[in-house]
Amino acid sequence: MDHMGTVYHRCRLRLKKGEERSLLRGNPCVRKHQIAGVDGSYDAGCEAGVYDYRGHCLGAGFANMATDVVLRVVRFGAGPVDVALLRNRLAEAHAFRRRLFPPEEHAFRVVHAEGDWLPGLIIDRFGPYISIQFTTLGMEMRRDLLIPMIIERYKPRAIVLRNDHEDRNIENLPRQVKVIHGELPRQVEITVDGLTFQADLLSGARTGFFLDQRDNRRRAAAMCADSLVLDACCNTGSFAVMAALRGARRVVGLDNSGAALNLAEQNAAMHNTTDRCSFVRDDVFVYLRKYAENGEDPFDLIFLDPPPLIQSRQTMDRDISTYRRLNRLALKCLKPGGILVSSTRSALLQTRVFLEELGTAMRASKRRARLIRHSGSSPDHPALPGMLETRRLKCAFLATGGGSAKPRRK
């Protein structure tokens, strides 16, 4: 221990005066510009303590000085980041999900990185199958500690490492997909909210299925009775199927992945909705532009869920304009009184800016619209109030009106 009674870490990061404020607000990321110096012995991925300018220990986590985020705090306050703490974090995450879902629900996010105070670790459960992503060096180095804990708790039939996330590039980690426990079929059946879907946990988008949109899909599907619906960037067609089951007159599912659309067609067939669901392979920008230009029947509801379009802080302005253009095209394909459910998963795009850009798209499309709901991920994807970036998914429900969105000049 040091002279103030706090645990002495082999590696100690000293913060500049005033740079402790973000940590005190609960943000677990310590960035390079906040550091005044490093004491002790540092190795990439090692456990390190973070101290304010007076020498008080603020927390401990895993360090990687080769990245802009040099420390990701796992434990706030004094104390080690040991096996007992990691085991306790997993137990807390499990107990929280059991409060969220009934006992028969077995498809949900088990661990959501910073949202469960385990930065760099994502675990999704799909019934007897587990999909895991290690996105930081610190967590990757503790993989052999964590995997047995996960096996012990969930006794999965198979575990797949989906270590193909782009964040691994930042940490200088190789990207790979690998089954590390049991045998995983090429396609698996998963049940979400009582509906069964085919999913590809090996090569499907993200970890195999978009669990974060669970609540938004349910709310949007409730608005689809007797409607012409577009599920844009539909992936495996879960929303298209739900819309059809809730009474949509016709649903078009759009995606640029042939493999995803193959699963979407299977999912529609499983629920006897092929008479109302059709699927198109195309680029979303190209499809929406052609649809509006050809004067096709406007949609009553569009569910727009593109992949993250913001690549970096350096390209922010350019990439934001891409969101604006996409939503402008979608609004042009809606009938007056139609509903646009628009989402973004770009962590760098803050909620305020996202909504402002929707307003700009609305004016550019010469449409009026009201924001009738604004939401985020389902609660098994918790975010930290002190770290806006953890609220990746932003979802806005816009109800359009007729006439021009542009105010008249007097």
Image: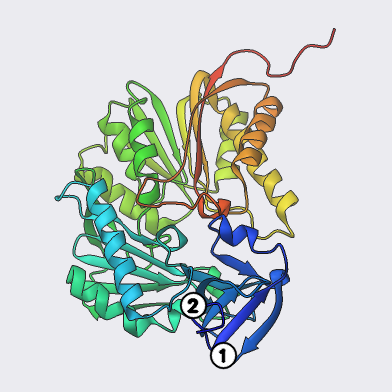
In front of the other: 283 or 221: 221
Q: Which residue is pictured at 60% across the width and 36% down the height?
A: 327
Outermost residue toward the bottom? 41
Q: Residue 268's image quarter?
A: top left
Image location of residue 205, percent across then percent down? 42, 60
Q: Nearer the viewer, mark 1 or mark 2?
A: 1
> Crowdedness of circle 2 by 10 Å Cα count: few (<14), some, many (20+)?
some
> Crowdedness of circle 1 by 10 Å Cα count: few (<14), some, many (20+)?
few
Picture layout, residue 193 above or below residue 295 = below
410 with respect to 205 (left or right)? right
Q: Which disc, if any, is residue 43? A: 1
Outermost residue toward the top? 410
Q: Which disc, if any, is residue 184? A: none
Q: Which residue is pictured at 25% across the width and 80% down the height?
A: 148
Image location of residue 408, percent across then percent down? 78, 11
The answer to whether one can see residue 408 in this image is yes
Picture layout, residue 293 above or below residue 141 = above
Q: Earlier in the sequence, mark 1 or mark 2?
A: 1
Which quadrant does the C terminus fall into? top right
Q: Secondary structure at mark 2?
A: loop
**Residue that label 2 marks:** 175
